[in-house]
Image (cartoon, grey):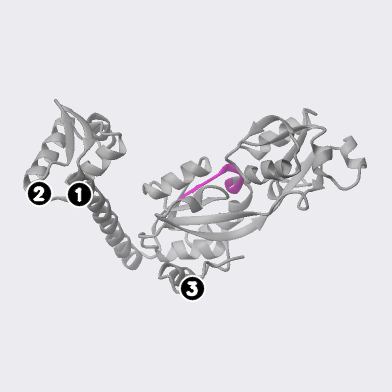
Amino acid sequence: MKLQQLRYLVEIERRGLSVSDAAEALFTSQPGISKQVRMLEEELGVTIFERSGKRLTGITEPGRLVLDMAERMLREAQNMKRVGEDFAAEATGALSIATTHTQARYTLPPVIRRFVDRHPGVKLHVQQGSPVQVAEWVIDGTADLGIATEALDRHHELLTLPCYQWSHLVVVPKGHPLLARGPASLATLAEYPLITYDATFTGRSHIDRAFERQGLRPNVMLTAIDSDVIKTYVELGLGVGIIAEMAFDPLRDTALASVPANHLFEANTTRLAFRRDAWLRAYEYDFLELLAPQLTRRVVEATLRGEGADPGL
């Protein structure tokens, strides 16, 4: 049995049982993968994949067990490599962070600046996507850490830790009538066309829930995944914007005015996640603490061992 054979199994499942797609992803040949899978099945004495001719059509019951063990073995092999890197080359390495646009644009820049100053030999990769994609990338190992407000805490494979809380903010063009109407209410906001986040992004569920509780049907005429896009259309006078509070900068957003909305919508919690079975390198613990000072190595390790409550805010 070879680790490469296990990689083939896992990649075949990941690619929807397409051997050709798995071969392309692993930069090898389809016949080579098929041969290695057959050899492994003969060695183990079980059939892993159901077949119809040359096409794989499913996973057998023993095959499911083999695949689960193969994934664990590959993760442990990766952890062994990370342990070696952590102790042999503490000043170098790589860190992949998956996050949403709002976090990458407004929250992470000062954190990453401080991290780079401390760890100039570590190569950083930041990839942006939806909260669902962020969770998937961390689960499949594409990213080491995930940062998002939605979706991360739905997966048992991930340890999810709260980082900080934030509120939504209403933004309008300067001189907008809403500014003269006193403290904002949901009923008042429902009178205007609204521009806010896509349904799966940046606390949008809290916005929808607030209106539903008061029996209001807001006119959400435009949605986006990008706070800058929302502000651009608000500046054009197309509607009233609801954005994350950290996305508004009065020094930059000079054409806009803000209206507090923390009394209208629930607070949002941004969370960080990583695989429960991953070995965190020393510089990853350092990144966690730079992002959220309460997430010290001692606290995170205790949480992993189940020795304490989830470190709240």
Query: Amino acid type of disc 3?
Result: Gly
Where, by quadrant of the figure, is residue 76 drawn?
Answer: bottom left
The answer to whether the residues at label 1 and label 2 have Cβ atoms under 8 Å apart is: yes
Mark 2 residue element = helix
**Magenta-drawn segment:** 97-104
Is residue 147 shown to the viewer in this render? yes
Image point (48%, 45%), residue name: 134
Is residue 158 left or right of 202 when viewed as pictured? Answer: left
Residue 301: give x, y in percent of width and height: 43, 70
Q: Amino acid at mark 1?
A: Val
Residue occupied by mark 1: 66
Which disc, if any, is residue 308? 3
Viewer-proximal residue among 119 and 183: 183
Q: Secondary structure at mark 1?
A: helix
Residue 272's tag is none
Residue at the (51%, 62%) spot, across then down: 288
Left-right relation of 13 to 153:
left
Residue, x 79% and y 46% (percent of image)? Answer: 250
Q: Earlier in the sequence, mark 1 or mark 3?
A: 1
The foreground one among 266 and 196 is: 266
Q: Is residue 113 above or below residue 310?
A: above
Give the image location of residue 180, x and y in percent: 93, 41
